[in-house]
Image: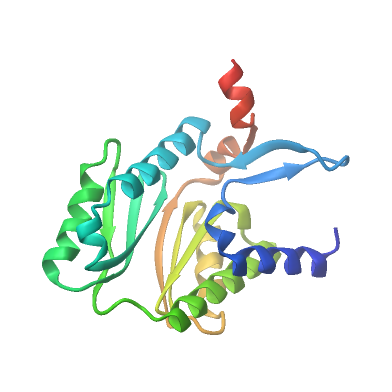
Amino acid sequence: MNKSFRLSLLLALCVAGLLQACIPLVAVGVGGGVAATIDRRTYGEQVMDTEIQHRFNRQFPSALEAKTNASATVFNRWVLLTGQAMDEQSRAEVEALARSIPNVREVFNELSIAYPASFTSRSGDTLLTSKVKARLFDSPLVAGTQVKVSSESGIVYLMGLLTEAEANAAVDIARTTAGARKVVNMIEIITPEQAQARTVAQPPAAEQSAE
């Protein structure tokens, strides 16, 4: 797959709103079949993150939906809250919900007190996220598959398990991407040895379940 086609495909997926599903990524073999999931989190950590995300979505009260436009991004049991809340009480209630979910390590409440973002603003954030992600994938300095990217009102949030050199490169890429007003670095730093040990091909979920 040549570089231009790869980037075009990634942008298409991201604009379609599928960027949040880009991590974990899958490795594709020569024959085009899915080989394994590549992620520095263990399979168990990935499952735990998915469960935290599902619980947050399922337990979000309808009464709170009317007063907030909140999204949760989960990585390695850290929960990032972004969006808007009509008042401080609603903002605090969203954080309390996130903190009540089992296995959550930490909650970062980045909800702003404001009216819900417009469709134009949300579309701009989706495009910004896609551009940052595409540049990360194209960089030889950072493993793009290991960085979780989200954007809100032009602020880019980075999460992942990266070495210090990779994290610095990722932040610089996000900072210099057109449309980025600010970069919030939420990357967990690991040693090169830890990165090497964690970067292993793990069996797909279906195979894990069968064991």
Residue 130 appears in which quarter of the rendering?
bottom right
Percent coordinates x, y for residue 196 in the rendering: 60, 40
Farthest residue to the right: give it: 31
61 or 71, nearer to the observer: 61
* Residue at x-position 61% and y-position 73%: 131
Query: In screen coordinates, is 8 left or right of 1?
Result: left
* Residue at x-position 34% and y-position 57%: 80
Q: Is residue 139 visible?
A: no
* Residue at x-position 68% and y-position 67%: 12
* Residue at x-position 81% and y-position 70%: 4
Percent coordinates x, y for residue 77 in the rendering: 36, 43
191 or 97, nearer to the observer: 97
Percent coordinates x, y for residue 32 in the rendering: 84, 43
128 or 187, nearer to the observer: 128
Residue 200 appears in which quarter of the rendering?
top right
Q: In the displayed structure, would residue 1 be above or below residue 3?
A: above
